[in-house]
């Protein structure tokens, strides 16, 4: 009875027939639990994860748990022409395992074997790398996989000079798998990778596969290319060979031009690299890789050179097929015995198809019980162009002829096709396809995102000299992530501090040379992020947002509890529902907050408010510091967003502290209407009238001899002249002029319109004018000091004091009244000068001169209740009509041209006596004349 497949496979005990197998598969399941049947796979430089093999295997065990091998290391070995014992190893991990079919206990399985690097394609992440080099970024990602399951990541760097790779201020992995992120990062810098394999069937991990990352051709091995014959594949041949060889040539290798704007140096760095292609048609590949894509011109030149090298590497391509089992990517070899020439080459990709040399009976049973194995035709890369030369085949039919399963000649069980380039061509991976699209683009950044402003711990605002801030995105993971998720690597990529991100520029409506608008978002605010040219590595802050849910008819937020550095930011002004808050959002403007309370909004503030209520328009500039404000229009009490009671109309400037108004060329305070800034027609007319009236009164006083002895006439001429000067100064006009130099103005287009004259005082006067009156009131002191003071009224002046009035004059004092008949409506018909003391004495003294009392009419000296004393230390003369009474030298002399009559009830004449008068003592304290200095 014919044995079943299960029985046949069960007889394959460990060690039995191992020496004759072309393929050997070692797994943690044990020897010969899986017997390789067919293998199809591909290896390539910088392609995918490096390699991928699909293996079909037969097993006497149809009940292998499918998850037993997932992630486990396996070793596939291939017998080569060089040795039956030194096998070619492929080490990797199982990434897929399925049962294709089973019958009577036997089964066929399919395994997908890939390197540890393939597992990086299973994790999608968003992560920010700051101030890190390319090597540091790659090492950081690889480190996350060390110790994960059965993975034993191994890698080595082979770089010509690590110093050429600068630190990158910001590198963002956004919604990418780790593999896609690292591939685009490495390939964009001209780096590439492949794997080296070592087999160790008796070791726990069955061997090792090591990733090699390089940037120069010297990293490829061996140094001396391996010779391989261009020869047929036949059972009689002792060596493997290549049976097909095709050379493709393309002249399309453009010059590379890169241009990138760098805002820090304010220039576009343009670099170029020549293609070295001999072609009559010049072509340029102009690439704008984004803003500040490279920090220095030398870095840009390196990138341009590597792109040009990538184009040159595409010019000449070798494509072939053969049975050379040692062929591997990154391997130098030379094709010999070719009818045209020998071809030193560097292998880039190899596609393997292998069928194990199991017994014919096993293959027959497997096909009968489990069905045939589907084999895909080898994928052959198309040529870059249709023009080809040097296509040669050496016994190609024999190479592809089907073999019997038990044929000992391995050429019928192994076949490959490959691509290569001339060995002296610098290899770089091309960055764009034939349509100009990037092969490994950055992830498309969303048009906008929001983020939270972060800073150093305890600081309400974190910025630098160049108007930049730091932000933390919502997708960052870490100890203080907004999504409350930790990063699986335990790396704190969301600390909610200045370590969360790099410096990000803040857009502003105006930005000029030492001028512009300045609003720095503060820690905790939510801001809008836009990405320049869609580049996830180039964020810019373009605005800020309110968030949370504001309280109804009140300030602050209903949403409490911060995540990370987030603060709850509700708008200060809003459309309310009741009371003073009930308005249709008529308030707009700017409100700032004291730094110490930025996160709470409960401290002092500055604000510029525009109230657009119809019929009640208002503009208010205010600060809580000393309750200082300038209000214009319909003035109201405002508490946050509440429009409360009216306070007035017009303008109000108020502060609880000190205030000052300064004008270097003149200041006008007036209640008069005016068409121009310094229009003061009423004040000028008043000055003119005052000048005329003062001059007339002064001339009248001169005519009445109302002058101080020793002075010229018109002693108040200085005040009169001052009035004239003030009138003339206030009446001046000027045409507007600029202060720019001619050189500055020459480059500016002439401004038209607005010509004309405007009031422009000739000296910096202060003019107060009010047609309805001016009141200066204080319960304390009122001090007026001037070089010349002219007080003039068209009607009356009343000087009233509750206590004393003192007038001190250094020189002369004159009081003059015209004494005209008063108006009929005057309550007091008296005219002239009146000095009255309701209580207390009246004293008039000339301490260093004469005192003269004269009148055209009567002079009356009387005491209503006491005495009248007239005294002199020398002489007293009383005279009238030629008669007189002289008291002098102790004698009294009575003289008269006529009769002298005495009337008395009694006449008493006694001896001599004397009386000493009690005369006042006059102090000698002259008032010093002070000189006024302007």
Image (cartoon, grey):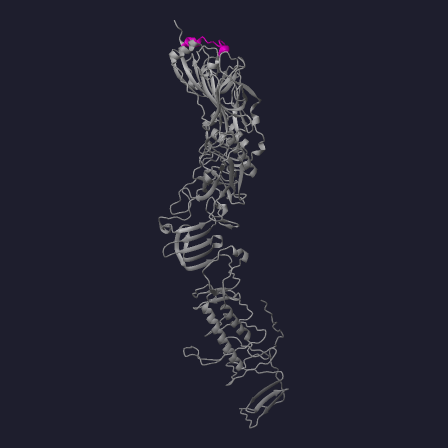
Q: Residue 60 vs residue 659: left or right? A: left
Q: Nearer the viewer, residue 369 or 428?
A: 428
Q: Quadrant of residue 163?
A: top right
Residue farthest toward the right in the current orientation of the protein: 889
Residue 554: percent from the left, percent from the top?
40, 47
Q: Quadrant of the N terminus?
A: top left
Give the total number of marks visible in the rendering: 0
Look at the picture and state if 109 lies above or below 293: above
Residue 84: percent from the left, percent from the top?
53, 12
Would you say residue 153 is visible in this rendering?
A: no
Residue farthest toward the top in the current orientation of the protein: 1
The residue under the point 51% across, 45% down is 467
Is residue 8 magenta-colored? yes
The residue under the point 47% across, 41% down is 540
Would you say residue 627 is visible in this rendering?
A: yes
Q: Nearer the viewer, residue 48 or 479?
A: 48
**Chain part drawn in magenta:** 5-21
Residue farthest toward the bottom in the current orientation of the protein: 898
Residue 628: percent from the left, percent from the top?
47, 55
Q: Nearer the viewer, residue 396 or 409?
A: 396
Residue 612: percent from the left, percent from the top?
39, 54
Look at the picture and state if 382 lies above or below 22: below
Is residue 166 magenta-colored? no
Look at the picture and state if 378 lies above or below 534: above
Q: Quadrant of the C terminus?
A: bottom right
């Amino acid at each position: 009875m014919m044995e079943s497949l299960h029985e046949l496979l069960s007889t394959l005990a460990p060690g039995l027939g191992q020496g004759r197998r072309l393929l050997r598969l070692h797994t943690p399941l044990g020897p010969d639990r899986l017997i390789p049947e067919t293998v199809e796979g591909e290896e390539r430089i910088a392609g995918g994860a490096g390699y991928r093999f699909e293996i079909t295997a037969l097993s006497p065990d149809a009940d292998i748990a499918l998850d037993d091998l997932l992630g486990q290391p396996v070793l596939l070995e291939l017998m080569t022409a060089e040795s039956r014992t030194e096998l070619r190893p492929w080490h990797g991990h199982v990434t897929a395992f399925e049962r294709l079919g089973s019958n009577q206990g036997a089964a066929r399985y399919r395994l997908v074997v890939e390197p540890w690097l393939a597992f990086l394609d299973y994790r999608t992440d968003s992560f920010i790398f700051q101030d890190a080099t390319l090597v540091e970024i790659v090492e950081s990602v690889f480190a996350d996989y060390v110790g994960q399951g059965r993975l034993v990541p191994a890698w080595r760097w082979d770089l010509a000079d690590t110093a050429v790779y600068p630190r990158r201020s910001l590198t963002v992995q956004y919604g990418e798998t780790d593999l896609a992120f690292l591939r685009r990062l490495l390939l964009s810098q001209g780096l590439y990778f492949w794997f080296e394999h070592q087999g160790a069937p008796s070791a726990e991990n069955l061997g090792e596969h090591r990733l090699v990352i390089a940037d120069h051709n010297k990293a490829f091995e061996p140094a001396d290319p391996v010779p391989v014959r261009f020869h047929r594949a036949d059972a009689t041949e002792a060596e493997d060979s290549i049976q097909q060889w095709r050379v493709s040539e393309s002249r399309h290798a453009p010059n590379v031009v890169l241009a990138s704007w760098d805002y820090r140096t304010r220039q576009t760095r343009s670099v170029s690299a020549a293609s070295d292609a001999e072609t009559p048609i010049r072509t340029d590949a102009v690439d704008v890789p984004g803003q500040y894509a490279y920090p220095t011109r030398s870095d840009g030149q390196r990138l341009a050179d590597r792109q040009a090298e990538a184009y040159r590497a595409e010019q000449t391509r070798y494509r072939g097929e053969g049975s050379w089992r040692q062929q591997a990517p990154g391997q130098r070899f030379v094709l010999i015995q070719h009818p045209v020439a020998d071809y030193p080459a560097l292998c880039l990709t190899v596609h393997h198809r292998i069928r194990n040399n199991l017994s014919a009976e096993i293959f027959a049973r497997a096909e009968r019980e489990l069905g045939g194995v589907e084999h895909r035709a080898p994928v052959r890369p198309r040529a870059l162009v249709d023009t080809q030369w040097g296509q040669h085949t050496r016994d190609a039919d024999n190479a592809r002829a089907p073999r019997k399963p038990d044929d000992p000649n391995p050429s019928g069980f192994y076949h490959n096709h490959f691509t290569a380039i001339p060995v002296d061509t610098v290899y770089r991976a091309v960055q764009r396809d034939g349509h100009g699209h990037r092969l490994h683009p950055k992830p498309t950044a969303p048009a906008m995102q929001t983020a939270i402003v972060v800073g150093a711990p305890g600081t309400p605002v974190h910025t630098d000299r160049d108007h930049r801030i730091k932000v933390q995105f919502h997708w960052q993971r870490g100890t203080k992530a907004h999504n409350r998720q930790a990063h699986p690597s335990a790396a704190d990529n969301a600390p909610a501090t200045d370590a969360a991100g790099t410096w990000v520029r803040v857009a502003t409506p105006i930005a000029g040379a030492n001028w512009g608008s300045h609003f720095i978002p503060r820690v905790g605010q939510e801001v809008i992020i836009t990405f320049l040219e869609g580049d996830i590595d180039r964020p810019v802050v373009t605005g800020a947002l309110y968030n949370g849910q504001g309280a109804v008819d009140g300030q602050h937020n209903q949403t409490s509890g911060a995540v990370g550095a987030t603060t709850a930011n509700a708008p200060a002004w809003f459309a309310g529902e009741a009371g003073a808050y009930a308005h249709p959002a008529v308030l707009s403007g700017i409100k700032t907050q004291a730094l110490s309370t930025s996160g709470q909004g409960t401290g002092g503030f500055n604000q510029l408010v525009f109230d657009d209520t119809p019929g009640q328009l208002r503009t208010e500039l205010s600060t809580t510091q000393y309750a200082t404000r300038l209000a214009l229009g319909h003035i109201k009490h405002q508490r946050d967003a509440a429009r409360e009671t009216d306070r007035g109309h017009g303008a109000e400037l108020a502060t609880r502290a000190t205030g000052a108004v300064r004008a270097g060329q003149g200041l006008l305070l007036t209640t008069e209407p005016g068409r121009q800034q310094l229009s003061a027609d009423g004040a000028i007319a008043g000055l003119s009238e005052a000048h005329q009236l003062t001059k007339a009164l002064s001339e009248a006083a001169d005519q009445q001899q109302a002058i101080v002895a020793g002075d010229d006439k018109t002693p108040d001429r200085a005040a009169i002249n001052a009035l004239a000067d003030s009138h003339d100064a206030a009446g001046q006009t000027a045409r507007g002029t600029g202060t720019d130099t001619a050189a500055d103005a020459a480059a500016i287009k002439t401004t038209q319109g607005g010509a004309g004259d405007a009031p422009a005082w000739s000296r910096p006067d202060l003019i107060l004018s009010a047609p309805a009156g001016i009141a200066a009131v204080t319960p304390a002191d009122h001090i007026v000091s001037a070089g010349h003071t002219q007080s003039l009224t068209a009607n009356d002046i009343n000087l009233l004091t509750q206590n004393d009035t003192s007038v001190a004059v250094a020189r002369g004092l004159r009081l003059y009244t015209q004494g005209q008949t008063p108006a009929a409506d005057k309550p007091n018909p008296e005219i002239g000068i009146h000095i009255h003391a309701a209580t207390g004495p009246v004293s008039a003294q000339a301490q260093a001169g004469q005192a003269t009392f004269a009148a055209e009419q009567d002079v009356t000296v009387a005491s209503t209740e006491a005495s009248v004393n007239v005294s002199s230390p020398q002489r007293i003369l009383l005279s009238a009509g030629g008669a007189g009474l002289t008291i002098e030298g102790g004698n009294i002399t009575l003289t008269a041209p006529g009769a002298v009559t005495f009337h008395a009830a009694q006449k008493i004449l006694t001896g001599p006596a004397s009386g000493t008068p009690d005369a006042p003592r006059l102090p000698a304290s002259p008032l010093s004349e002070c000189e006024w200095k302007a």
